[in-house]
Amino acid sequence: MLRRRWLLADQLGPHFLDDPAQPVLLVEIQELFRRRPMHRQKAHLILSAVRHRAAELGDRALLLRTDTFREALAQVAEPVEVSHPHSWAALRFARTVPGLTVLPARGFITSQADFAAWADRTRRGPLRMADHYRHVRRQHIVLTGPVNAAGQTRHPGAQGRAEPPPPIVEDDIDAQVRRDLDVWAADGVRFVGRDGPRQHPATHAEAQARLEHFLTHRLPEYGRYADVMSADDPLFAHSALSSSFNLGLLHPEPAVRAAEQAWRAGTAPRTAVEPFIRGLLGWREFLWQLYWYFEPRFRGADWLAATEPIPDWFADLDADAVEARCLADVLAAVRDRAWTHQTPRLLVLGNYALQRGWRPAEVADWFERCFVDGTDWVMNATVIGMSQYADLSRVDTRPYAVDGTDIDEISDYCGGCRYVPERALGDLACPYTGGFESFLHRNRERLVTDPRLAAELARRDEPEHREAVVAQEEKRGSTAP
Ligand code: SF4
């Protein structure tokens, strides 16, 4: 007899089921949304995805709304199984439920056993994504072998502006989700950010259509625009499919193979395909495996001893309180869309938090709650380890600390800003440039081992200037720049 498969809210794609006849359990727990303020659009996406999956499965699905998962599981008489959950908290819980079978993890290309064997074999210090990526590419034979050389001169998509995907059409399920969230909000559940039309896929079919649109229309431009930030175009050539992968709507392997095929067929250049594949097969797999390889959790790590709390204007996504154009625009994007691509996350949001010495665990929690794709396993390594430079023993990284001139180089923000990116002192001083210098001086003993930052320190180390910048930035403190 087939056991009933419990699908968690991040296991919603077809690859989380084996048998078309298998009965399914889905569970909605309102309490999870009450515990800490989540972005309204993220809450909408999760509920919409769970309910759409239940609707797709029809009579096979049992959708329960209970106060706890234990309560839901107690209502199911037959044996239940679940794929390996995607967080330590959920895994620990699953292991305490009598009779619940925990299956191996799904939704990733690499296995935990293989990663552990690789890491144990190669580890002589912090693990490097590039080394693991090379290992996985060899193992899975990705971006190797012959290419359609004739086709490599044709890149029809690589001309002009990258085309955005068509908007998602909401349905009755979304309308009901919106009504329910309004009721919850009236009942005291606190959300951050603004409500708005659903912008991210809630079903496998929507996600697959988005992936295909991306492969045809934006992948060819991806290499050229991956790091660019613009007030006019928040998407550029990005796929914006991270929430679809993290909800389990898409499996990364077919996406990697399809991108590789675009290169082999000559419809996208290797300079675009390789960074896209590196994101999925390199970074995503590496972060997932790091999460399970290292126990206890990253969240307590704080190498730079950053102790300042996140200020309210940032926590509440109050972009209107901010004059710095880059930060106001990116914070508004989070408020209005619950998503930005990776560069604004690292260089505008994370960089600001790092410079100001905000507590890494709070910053990670903020990213997890405010972004549609935020998960525990992603944020531990990307925010705690990389962005906030707080765990050097496990992630090999450099501080993502830059000044206003670096932001100016890859964005169109500074031209319309009241601050001047080259200035570290005075009324027009860019908060990122003053903040960067103050960060260097405050952490000088810890940062001298990094060649780039040691050179920056030496270049900016005139005592009078140093004292003035540190005093100015201390005065700025946690007020919105
Ligand atoms: Fe941002 Fe500074 Fe440029 Fe203004 S001048 S947009 S604050 S980097």
Image (cartoon, helix red, strand yellow):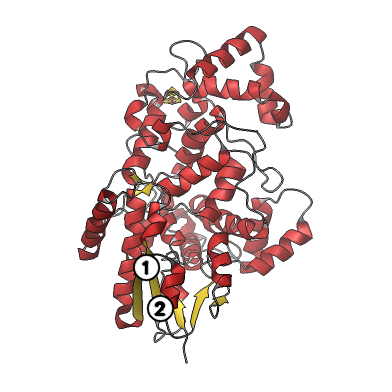
Q: Any mark on residue 278, and which?
A: none
Residue at 29% in and 43% down: 194
Between 447 and 67, the residue placed more toward the observer is 67
* The C terminus sits in image quarter: top left
SS for callout 1: strand
Compared with residue 214, is residue 83 higher up or lower down, i.e. above or below? below
Report the residue marked by disc 2: 75
Report the side of 6 relative to 179 (left or right): right
Identify which residue is drawn at 44% across, 75% down.
Answer: 73
- Which amino acid, mark 1? Thr
Name the residue tied to disc 1.
66
Indicate the position of residue 131 as horizontal and vertical percent values.
69, 54
Determine whether the beta carbon of the residue marked 1 sits less than 8 angstroms from the nearest atom of ligand 1: no
Which label's residue is closer to the chain start, 2 or 1? 1
Q: Provide the secondary structure element on which disc 2 rests.
A: loop
| Residue 170 in view in this figure | no
- The image quarter containing residue 267 is bottom left
In this view, the residue farthest toward the bottom is 1
Q: Position of residue 150 (x, y in %)?
A: 48, 60
288 or 218: nearer the eye? 288
State left or right for residue 214 relative to residue 402: left
In the picture as drawn, the residue positioned furthest to the top comes out as 464
Q: In x, y percent, where is residue 341?
A: 43, 45
Residue 374, given in percent of the width and then of the height, sits at: 46, 51
Whether residues under marks 2 and 1 lie with C-beta atoms below 8 angstroms apart, the answer is yes
Q: Nearer the viewer, residue 6 or 100?
A: 100
Q: Residues within 10 Å of mark 2 (few under 14, many from 20)?
A: few
Direction from residue 433 to residue 34 in the image, left or right: left
Find ligand 1 in the image and state its quadrant.
Answer: top left
Amino acid type shown at disc 2 = Gln
- Rendered view: 425 above or below 388: above
